[in-house]
Image (cartoon, grey):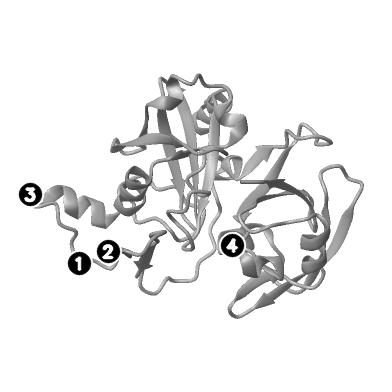
Amino acid sequence: MARNSDYDMCKEERKRESFFKVLQRVDLSSENLRALPYDFVRSFSNNELSGKMKIKARWGSSWEVEICKNPRFYFMDKSGWVKFVRDNALGDNEFLTFTHKGKMRFTVNIFKQDGKEMLQPPQSMASMASSKQGRFSTTPLATTITAESNEGVNYRRKLNFGKKKAEESQYSKRTEKVFSARRDSAGASSSSVAEFTTFIKKSYLIFMRVPKSVQTIHMPKRRTIFKIHHPNMKKSWNVVYLVADRGASFSGGWQRLAQEYPLAVGDTCKFSFIKQHELILFVSKP
């Protein structure tokens, strides 16, 4: 019987050090989004973390990004990170996995909002490569990143993908493997579970919007009560999941959870499914 090459590849990559990012339009260049997870960097030496990381895409393009450090964590340098994001027209709830291949070389797998992996560069990047001047072509996929000169510079992207046709597709086994991860914290089992991550901003202390990619794959289509557990399993909250035209969010009961957990602006929240309408919430402080 023929071997499943995608499955074998996933199995092999799970043996390597890796981490993931979910790119939303808000704060694409923020220090928190560029942070390298603590459990990931502690396996590297100070010498390795004092240089650059080389990120390589499936189609062969690569980017060098310097590694910086503040008193709290290591993070990717802004200029290199923004170039990587801009070149790949990212920021629409893509799911990225970074897998270490040795000597600070990483392969990046990019999964778009519909769950499909990018296997070739975006049209804007291909146009840039074919131009001697290195200019972006004015295509529907053209991406604009503007820099504001105020202190605390923010980069904002404007994406115009045109109208998308509604479609339902069977996701590949490889995609499903990436969207599931081993629960490795206290009280977790060894089985694979679906997960998603979001970053807490001020409004999310009252209600929290759920990324569209997560709504499509994992969430119910109507109002539902979710039970959200603390990792120690000694505390849990019933939270209302609301579905509206403008998007879905955790609403009733969420503010109480934020106060009692407690959550703060800048926290990274990882939700792991243990049942259809039951989650464990893991929080990383910046």
Residue contact at pointers 2 and 1, CB within 8 angstroms: yes
Tell me which label, 3 or 4, sits earlier in the chain: 3
Q: Position of residue 149 (x, y in %)?
A: 31, 63
In the image, is residue 128 above or below residue 247? Answer: above
Q: In 3D space, how far apart are the residues under numbered discs 2 and 3 (Cα atoms)?
A: 18 Å
Q: Amino acid at mark 3?
A: Lys
Amino acid under disc 1: Thr
Query: Which residue is rendered at x = 48% and y = 21% of the image?
Result: 46
Q: Which residue is mark 2?
A: 142
Near mark 1 (Cα within 10 A), the count class, few <14, some 14-19 or many ≥20, is few
Q: Which residue is mark 1?
A: 138
Q: Disc 4 on helix, strand or loop?
A: loop
Name the residue beneath numbered marker 4. Answer: 211
Left or right of residue 260, residue 144 in this image: left
Q: How many marks?
A: 4
Give me the C-alpha separation between circle 2 and circle 4. Answer: 23 Å
Q: CA distance from mark 3 to mark 4?
A: 38 Å
The three-letter code of the residue at mark 4 reads Pro
Q: 265 above or below 3? A: below
